[in-house]
Amino acid sequence: MKNFVVKTIANAGALAVAVWLLDRITLTGDSTGKKVGTLIVVALLFGLVNSFVKPVVQVLAFPLFILTLGLITLVVNALMLLLTSWLAGKLQLSFHVEGFWTAVLGGLIISLVSWALNMVLPDED
């Protein structure tokens, strides 16, 4: 359970950095508390998408992983971010990613920041 909380915090932090760095990834809210709450819910949603949808996409795209020497990972990460944005819209959360190339750059930022945060944050039960 602790590992799940740590990963969610890392995802929320990584999403916050992407929102802060990229103008076309938006998170709106009336107050800081509401923004933080939305960010945590979006991080949970992003974690669910990465846990259930991403492995299926990776298996289906396996030949492309070999052909592109793994660079297709950027596209898969972007698609997972766009799917999270779409689901957030359906759940009436104020998180939006505008455009594929923004999602590619956002996915790269989120991956790097999440990796760094997971290295720093404890993950032992």
Image (tube, helix red, strand yellow):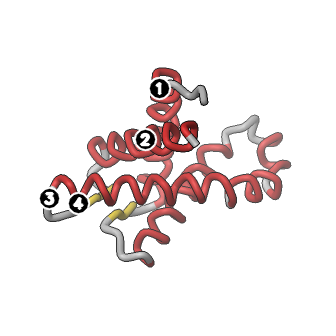
Provide residue 9's location: percent of width, then percent of height.
43, 41
Residue at x 51% of width, y 24% of height: 122
- Helix, strand or loop status at disc 2: helix
Left or right: 31 as drawn, with respect to 81:
left
Choose the circle earlier in sequence order: 2 or 4. 2
The residues tagged by marks 4 and 1 sit, at their Cα atoms, a distance apart of 24 Å
Q: Residue 73, image x and y in percent?
A: 65, 44
Instruction: Measure the alpha-carbon separation of dots 3 and 4.
Output: 5 Å
Q: Amino acid at mark 2?
A: Ile
In the rendered view, tell whether residue 32 sits above or below residue 109: below
Lower sequence index among marks 2 and 1: 2
CB atoms of marks 3 and 4 within 8 Å: yes
Which residue shows up at 29% across the image and 58% down it?
26
Which residue in the structure is indicated by mark 3? 31
Give the amino acid at mark 4: Lys
Q: Earlier in the sequence, mark 1 or mark 3?
A: 3
**Other residues around mark 4 within 10 Å, as few (<14) / some (14–19) / many (≥20):** few
Question: On the image, which quarter does residue 10 sit in?
Answer: top left
Does label 2 or label 3 sit earlier along the sequence?
2
The kind of secondary structure element at disc 4 is: helix
**Disc 1 from disc 3: Cα separation:** 27 Å
Badge 2 crowding class, 10 Å Cα cut-off, few under 14, some 14 to 19, many 20 or more, is: many
Residue 59: x %, y % from top left: 82, 53
Mark identifier at residue 34: 4
Asked if marks 2 and 1 touch (Cβ < 8 Å), the reply is yes
Indicate the position of residue 74 as horizontal and vertical percent values.
Answer: 59, 44
**Contact flag, marks 2 and 4 (Cβ < 8 Å):** no
The kind of secondary structure element at disc 1 is loop
Residue marked by disc 1:
121
Residue position marked by numbered label 2 in the rendering: 9
Quadrant housing the C terminus: top right
Q: Residues within 10 Å of mark 3 (few under 14, many from 20)?
A: few
